[in-house]
Amino acid sequence: MIKPPYKLRCEYLENPIEIDSPSPRFSWVLEHEQRNQCQSAYQIIVSSQRSLLSSEEGDLWDTGKIISEDHINIEYNGKPLKSNEQYYWRVKWWDKDNTESSFSEVSSFETALLEDSDWKAKWISKKEFVEKETRHTLQYKSGGRNLFGRLREVKAIYLRKEFNLEKPIEKAKLYICGLGYYVLKINGRRIGNRILDPSQTDYNKIALYSTYDITTDLQKNNAIGVILGNGRCIELYGYDFPKLIVQIHILYKDGTNDIICSDESWKVSNGPILENGIYYGERYNARLEMTGWDTPNYDDSEWNNVSIVEGYNLASQLMQPIQISQVMNPKNMSSPQPGVYVYDFGQNFTGFVRLKVRGPKGVQVTLKFAENINEDGTLNFATNRTAPVNEIYILKGNGEEIYQPQFTYHGFRYVELTGFPGVPTMETIEGYFFHSNVPKVGDFICSNDLINKIHKNVIWGQLSNLMSIPTDCPQRDERHGWMGDAQLSAEEAILNFDMARFYTKYLRDIKLAQKEDGSLSDVVPPYWPIYPADPAWGAAYAVILWYMYWYYDDIRVLKDHYESLKKYIEFLSINANDNIVTVGGKYGDWCPPMSIVSKRTPLELVSTWYYYHDTLILSKIAKILGHEIDFNRYTEKVKEIKDDFNREFLMRTYKYLKSSFIDRAISQTSNVLPLYLNMVPEEKEKSILNYLIDAIRGHYDYHIDTGIVGTRYIFEVLTDNGYPEIAYKMINQTSFPGYGYMIKEGATTLWERWEKLESSGMNSHNHIMLGSVDTWFYNTLTGISSLSPGWEKLRVKPFLPEDMNYAQATLNTIKGLIYSSWEKLEDTLIITLNIPVGCKVEAWIPIKHERNIIKEGDTVIWEEGKQSESKLSIEFKEIKDNYVLFGLGSGYYKFSVDYF
Ligand code: BGC
């Protein structure tokens, strides 16, 4: 008997309760005791009742035995699914020898609201918001919309409703969209542990609702309370005012149903949250708390009736919510001035703090947040730019009071506390690190401490910038979905985290942001509508789409976005002159050392290169989807762009760009980009490469001179062309500019700039756009790279730097666990691999000489320059550049080489 499938997922999630697709997809993971195994067939059964599945009956769908190796994203194709239902499924498999497993454990998925018409509830809000005049006095300091729209961060509003249940209930599910952000309470208890929900979208196009199972939260008499904060749902960001829709579906034990909806019977009031805003922070007056407002039998006669308002199109959120992943304790507290207390968390992160305080009624305590500190120990707020970033808490004065904000977040390492009654302690504040709670799937560690630190900073920076959209930074007056930052860090994000849901959602955001003419915005959702996007930013569409296919084997997204991507490429094409793109480029190889816009790398070169890059991806997608005419057309186009790119840039720019006769500097990026996509005419390839290498060695003394674009590709180009040790040396630099320099200067995340800058301007200390280096650790140091969609074929080709003793990586891929490690022991090199069922690997085992002996387990497999014994599932392929290449199937392998 073989082990049944496990880790069953529906739409990438385990037992989701918010599916809004009529044909959700199923995936599972396989394990086998034997090597070189794969699935030869599967059977899925889906049922309306758990009990039916115990008797292995699928009343909704029984695929029967399907001959197929696929076990990722198998589309449901049974009887139509209904809204707000729970379904159960199991799956079994046959291995390649046709041995059959038993059925898996039962997994389930629940539908949310599949049709717009399932929504019976009404959108509600507060009268003063609806009327333009009063809204303006509430939302703008001047009371009128002026140029900069000086924001008055309007109060949060409190909404409530009581209802009774006359019969025992079987199940209750609640669907809610509260914009900008909501906090949901039932019978005095907070429901769920989401923060800053729902996910940010362009509300004019789509708003996302969240789903909660509230079966155990209900009783006979109930009160539901919702607090609404501003988030981005105010005029300043292109919307009007906060609003709410809620719908509860009750199934009674006797089989009957009820729906409870937001409607005109709800009541609304102001409350203790006096001001709230993403950038602003929050002002909270505890004296205005309304004890019991979220419990039954509260006297709300003073509250107002809500207004029915116009709402937005809705879709299920279906992605990991923002949640606290780590409680942070301050490492140090100091008092640089009387009454001013400064806490240092020792780590730059995204979140807020919880305050504990005792004191007299009316005392006002202020918390301020910053990434940096001045020499005198006070906070340096410069990198927040115009974001005020503070919390003000006014005490109610009865015993210990605990406060944490609801509708804001900060990017910070230091906190300043003033106005505190008495002397605070280390326990006075506690930090919470939160972000879109994507599961961690990658792990990397090695013997080089600096590389481990860079990796750690990337992880902190990446998570800090997942706030339901991929943000640029968490601290200053931006925090936007800048698409350049998003695309350049996408592969790193996918190696470290399960990004499938996050990026599926973001791709829809991109599509919805597309204009009729095909153009995209630099920022998505387009809270700052900057059209047309710089091509390096617009590339996020093609890049993320491609990675969804490449890493998650997701064909559905390719289909969903094909026409829009094509429209975007056509937009670039119309705006190109002889295939040279001059429109939209404004950032290019953004932020190289010592400048913001690159002086060495022309904007047009970067823009045109991305035009080529995106068209190439489009042509591949056309092929995959069987659009033959498009495939031929875009393949032709790709050739044309390449020729024109070389005609325009080869001789003038990417080979020779020097500032002057005596300045030997060339643009690293201009040379790296065409090498990366094999665009250089064959006869020139060697000389371009040598030119780059000479400049890195001679002129740059093994330092990076790239902005965010060049940095993304340079290490890979050097490695693929036989110079991994140069990439390694550049990454390890501790002098300016380099990752090691940042770390030497105290960075605990990645900076926006290579320089250490702490004044206001473009100086964020928590940007992720240079985080792309992390992929090199996985792809080169532990050598794992994917060679086909969904990891079906992969390569493991570790690079062993002289000064390193070990490296190890784990990747929990969609196919299962990939593991690669190497360790130099006294006279042996040990390489360990784990390859999931269904995957084929090219295993490149490093040797020093052809005479080295390679063993797998206890068996000698390579001796005297040839394969000594053919071992099941280990197949010698070739010997090249001090590696012996074996073809392997799934399983666990331990190789040893007498390396030294
Ligand atoms: C952001 C960047 C972004 C850039 C566009 C900045 O203000 O912080 O990360 O990509 O603008 O040039």
Image (cartoon, rainbow, N blue to C red):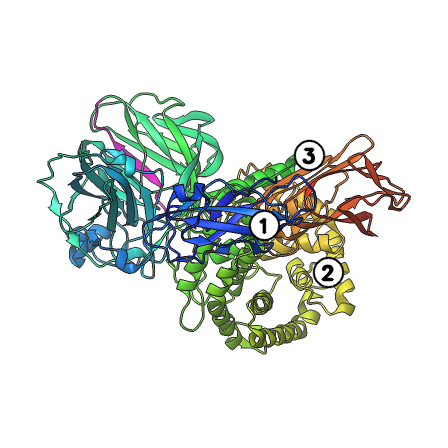
Q: What is the quadrant of residue 854 in the picture? A: top right
Q: Which mark is residue 447?
A: 3
Instruction: Classify mark 3 as within 8 Å of ligand 1 or not, answering yes or no.
Output: no
What residue is disc 1 on?
772
Point out the image quarter for the C terminus: top right
Q: Under tag 1, what secondary structure?
A: loop
The answer to whether the residue bearing label 2 lies less than 8 angstroms from the nearest atom of ligand 1 is no
Q: What is the span of residues highlighted in magenta in the rendered image?
A: 387-398
Q: Where is residue 29 in the image (x, y as percent from the top left)?
A: 56, 45
For the view shown, which residue lies furthest in the left direction? Answer: 301
Q: Are marks 2 and 3 in contact (CB under 8 Å)?
A: no
Q: Earlier in the sequence, mark 3 or mark 1?
A: 3
Measured as percent of width and height from the top left, residue 127 is found at 15, 52
Report whether residue 762 is seen: no
Quadrant assignment, res 379? top left
Image location (x, y in percent) of residue 692: 72, 58
Circle 1 packing at 10 Å, graded few (<14), some (14-19), many (20+), is many
Q: Between 352 and 380, which is closer to the camera in this rendering?
A: 352
The label nearer to you, 2 versus 1, is: 1
What is the three-letter code of the residue carrying label 1?
Answer: Ser
Q: Report if residue 735 lies within the magenta region.
A: no
Q: Badge 2 local density, few (<14 within 10 Å), some, or many (20+)?
A: few
CB atoms of marks 2 and 1 within 8 Å: no
Element type at mark 2: loop
